[in-house]
Structure formats: structure tokens, C-alpha cells
Image: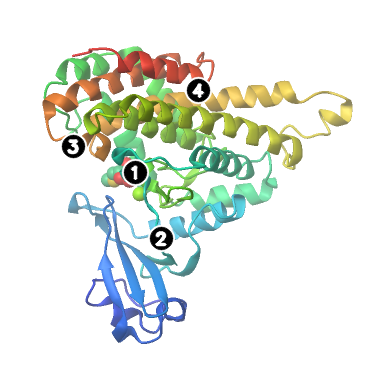
Amino acid sequence: MSAGTSYEALSVETLPDRLKGLAALAGKVGADSGTWQVQEVGDGNLNLVFIVIGPTGKAVVKQALPYVRLVGDSWPLPLYRAFYEYHALTRQAARDPGSVPEIFHFDEAQALIVMEYLSPHVILRRKLIAGEKVDGLADFLGRFCARTAFRGSELSMKSGDKKADVGLFAGNVDIPAITEALVFTDPYYSAEMNHHTEGLAPVVDRLQSDVALKVKVQQALQRFVSNTETMVHGDLHSGSIMSTDRESRVIDPEFAQYGPMGFDIGMLCANFLMAYFSQPAHRGGELEAYQSWILDVIEEVCSTFETEFRHLWATERTGILYPASLFEDQGHDSTPACDAVLSGIWHDAWTVCGIEMHRRCLSLAHNADFEDIADPAARAPLEARNLLMGAELIHTAETLADARAVCALAREFNRKDVL
Ligand code: SR1
Ligand code: MG
């Protein structure tokens, strides 16, 4: 398949013949495409994902579809998202080496990325539902969020490079628009694609009639669309992380844009909190111990983020923001400035966290943590705890002390009979 050929979606049947000339793929899996075994394993909402297995190795071929897979061709979606995913992956690889799969090839016309097959990694969300622990997870994620936030901002980048990159990613319009609608807007009114578990109506009504809440969420949306602090992954949930028992990688940054530094870590913490609140339906034995482990992960992700961010502040502050010429060179400690930047990050993070907790139970794309609970009567009370804690986070985001306070709140809501 050569660049410039008009786009055509691949299938298990057509892939070997269409990609047999691709040296980057043949070099990994073997030159004889007749020996390739192909499986389509995409279980996300948007794309085709193939595993290609040959005599000399395995590779992943990810191809964007021209529509939202979850919904069908009634919702067209530009193929250019693969271009932004590719560019986001290269930036994440540079800003936090080893954190993302290795890229072997990108074909813009076919909206296709050939990349490393991660094995024996599985989607983290699946491990959390199964009650499995991952060593080093919090360290890895805290560092990833801090490094990509700091190194993608004017704290580190040259002003011209940053502006050029903001310009490049500004072309990613329709994908962030999904977030603007599904995440920030739809949960707070009866949007067409919304759905929620039977029995949750009183909680949904309470959230949707809370005007102060809607104002705070809209303020967060305003920051999301107009604050280009750093390149965010844009969809950093537990389905965008693949882990073994001791190693993790971040995948799927097609929602990348320049946005607030607290966005990714906020969305990430929300997904751990939803894993936490859903646990009573997934296990009996070891429930408390496993829930405690999840909260420990949240606390450690956040403390690692702070430590790494402060380390980068001290060692890599090479951009136009808070320059040493204004602080250290004048004999002035810049710690209060770093404290203030971090405080803004946490305000954004906890607000986004609450919003993500809402959208996954109210808007279009729910998550398996709750959806795998077959009985609505068991699911609704757990989702209700999650929804009300989300509201509390949004209301108090500016004054929350730290992740420990957030986890204390989670323990409190986990004991509540809301419905
Ligand atoms: C229509 S896309 C729905 C969701 O799937 C993606 O993974 C994002 O989370 C998006 O919000
Ligand atoms: Mg995704």
C-alpha cells in the first residue's frame, strides 16, 4: 500500500495482500504475507485494530474508520485523527521515553499506524475489573503525566516551537469536539445520546438542576478549549493504558490537543475512582484490600506527579515561563511560583475528575467497570455514589487539600446508601 492511494478500510482478509509491500511491517513479522495470521481486536469506540502474526514476530496495525465505530456510519468522523495520534505518540515518546508503543510506520492516506505489539500486556481496565495489581503503575503514570505536562509547555519548550505545535494540533477539531460535547456538556442536560441505569433518575435530576455545578463545569470547558498549556493525551482512562503485572504503557492519544496541564491526571484519577466504586459488584473476598490498593494508586500517582513536576521545575525550566533570570538569578526562591502553578493544575484536575465520573454514567460512552455489572439494581447504587462524589469534587476542587483528601472523600461516599 503506498501513500497517496485513496483510503480503504482494511479487513482481516485484505490486510496481508494490501500491506505485503510495507517494509516496516514485513521486517517485523516476515516477508511472506501468505504466512501472516491476522486478527481484528479493536474493542474501543472508534478504530480498527489488527494484530498481525508472522514467522518472525508480531505487530499491531491500527486504522481509523471514517465514522464512530460505536455508533456506525451515521456519525462520520475525520480520518485525520490518525495523523494527530501519530504526532502525539512521537511527542510522548520524546517527553517520556519508553512510555508509549514504538511506532514502525505511519500512512496518512490510509489513516494507519503500524506499531509495536505489546505482550503480555492487557488493557488496564480489564485488570482492575479482575482485581489484579500492577507493580510500579502509580510511579509510571505519575511520571508520564508530569513529564508530558511539563515538557509540552512553555515551562520547558521554546516559545516558537510551542506555538508551532499548538498550531499543528489546532487542526484536530472534530475529535476534541467529542470531548466538549460528551464529557463536558451532555451529562448536564437530557442530551439525545444520553442513557443511564434504571433507578438513577433522582440523582441525575439533582445534578442536572444544580446550576452552580453547571457553571463550574462550563468554566472548566472554557479552560479546556482555550488554555493551550501543554499537549494533553486527551483520553487518558484505564482503557488507554496497557499493563502486565509490572510494566505499563500509554496508548491511543488520538484525542491529543493542547489543553490544561491538569486534564490528563484528572481524567485518569476519575477512572481509578470508578474502578474503586464498582468493586463491590466484582468481588467478595479481598474487596477492602483491593479497594485500598486502588486508592493507594491514586495517592501515589498524584504524589509522584508533584515530585516529578517539582524536579523538572528545578532542573528543566528552560522556557519563557518563570525563568531563572526572574527568580534564582535574583536570589529569589521560585518555590512559591511552583506551588501556585501546581495549585492551578490540581484545581483543573479535580474538576475534570468529577466531570469524567459523571459522563461515564450519564452520557454516550459508559465504561466497563460499571457496564459489566449485569444487574441494574446492583449497578445503580454504586453509580450513584460515584455521581455524587463527582459533584462534590467539582464543587470543592479549588480548596481540596490533596489526593489524600480526595481518597478520604471516596471512602466516605463508598459507605453511603445514596439511593
Ligand atoms: C464517540 S467516542 C466516545 C468516547 O470514546 C473515546 O474513547 C473517548 O473517551 C470518547 O469520549
Ligand atoms: Mg481510545
Give the x, y percent position of residue 34.
Answer: 29, 86
Q: Which residue type does callout 2 highlight?
A: Ser
Residue at which label 3 appears: 193
Q: Residue at x 28, y 75 (%)?
A: 37
Q: Are marks 1 and 3 in contact (CB under 8 Å)?
A: no
Single out the mark in the foreground, 3 or 4: 4
Q: Residue placed at 27% from the left, 36% from the top?
A: 369
**Which residue is located at x 57 percent, y 37 percent?**
229
Residue corresponding to mark 1: 127
Which mark is nearer the camera, 1 or 4? 1
Q: Secondary structure at mark 2?
A: loop
**Front label number (2 vs 3):** 2
Give the Cα distance between marks 1 and 3: 29 Å
- Which badge, 1 or 3, is on the more N-terminal residue? 1
Q: Sequence-wise, which precedes: disc 1 or disc 2? A: 2
| Residue type highlighted by circle 3 | Met
Q: Is mark 4 within 8 Å of ligand 1?
A: no
Say which amino acid is labelled 4: Ala
Q: Secondary structure at mark 4?
A: helix
Q: Is residue 9 visible?
A: no
